[in-house]
Image (spheres, coloured by chain):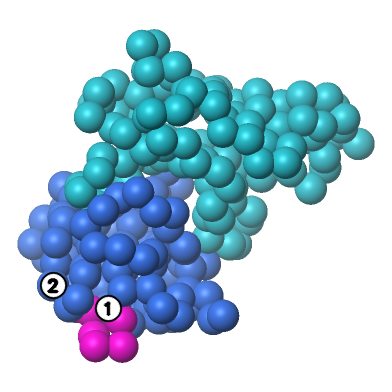
Chain colours: A cyan, B blue
Amino acid sequence: DQQVKQNSPSLSVQEGRISILNCDYTNSMFDYFLWYKKYPAEGPTFLISISSIKDKNEDGRFTVFLNKSAKHLSLHIVPSQPGDSAVYFCAASETNAGKSTFGDGTTLTVKP
Amino acid sequence: ETGVTQSPTHLIKTRGQQVTLRCSSQSGHNTVSWYQQALGQGPQFIFQYYREEENGRGNFPPRFSGLQFPNYSSELNVNALELDDSALYLCASRLGGRDGNSPLHFGNGTRLTVT
């Protein structure tokens, strides 16, 4: 069973508008959540994270929201730029478990 | 600051053969992990090494094995290759031991094709 799910394989938005990427998880032991961005022919790069003791974390144009009761997190990008076009992976981990569990990714396309 | 580097970038092997993939961790990082990414899927955790010992393993058979060296570089070995082993293999390093609460720094991966 897939413990981290990104139900939208792709998302297309206009430059300057908001991009919202969603992620759901099933394991209640997860206490740390991360978003990674991946360009073609490169490895994933860390974007932003949030601990389960928070419900929001902001870094410039990127904000991650966590709803623990719904086991749902989202990444908001405002304003979206063409350079944001990439595959975005949601990941979750448990303290002292070491491994990160990834979703299958959402391909974001930002149109000029 | 040197990032995570992996070699080779691409590799083609025949079913039944053995393969070794190599990784140099980011400077200062003492924990390295390996992930397998099949086409259209997210990275799947294979195992993690901290101070030269395996301290976490995903759902992969024993023919997937690894090593971490004193300089924190690492190898992933796969024996008896199967067609389903064809994937992108990603190495990632970070600070800390078993603690999962620090971001992973990934290399660009090795694309393995098994024919």
The chain holding disc 1 is: B
**Residue at the outermost left position:** B62
| Nearer mark to the viewer, of 2 and 1 | 2
Is residue A14 shown above or below A43?
Answer: above
Residue B114 can be seen in this image: no
| Magenta segment boundaries in residue numbering | B67-72
Tell me which residue sits at (29%, 21%) in the image. Answer: A26
- Quadrant in the picture for the C terminus of chain A: top right
Q: Is residue B25 magenta?
A: no
Q: Position of residue B15 (x, y in %)?
A: 23, 67
Tell me which residue sits at (47%, 63%) in the image. Answer: B106
Instruction: Kindly identify which residue carries mark 1.
Output: B75
At label 2, the amino acid type is Glu
Q: Position of residue A111 (x, y in %)?
A: 85, 34
Is residue B72 shown above or below B62?
Answer: below
The residue tagged with tag 1: helix, strand or loop? strand
Q: Nearer the viewer, residue A53 or A6?
A: A53
State which tag comes first along the sequence, 2 or 1.
2
Q: Which mark is residue B53?
A: 2
Judged by its main secondary structure, the magenta piece is: loop
**Residue at the outermost top position:** A70
At label 1, the amino acid type is Glu
Residue A93, image quadrant:
top left
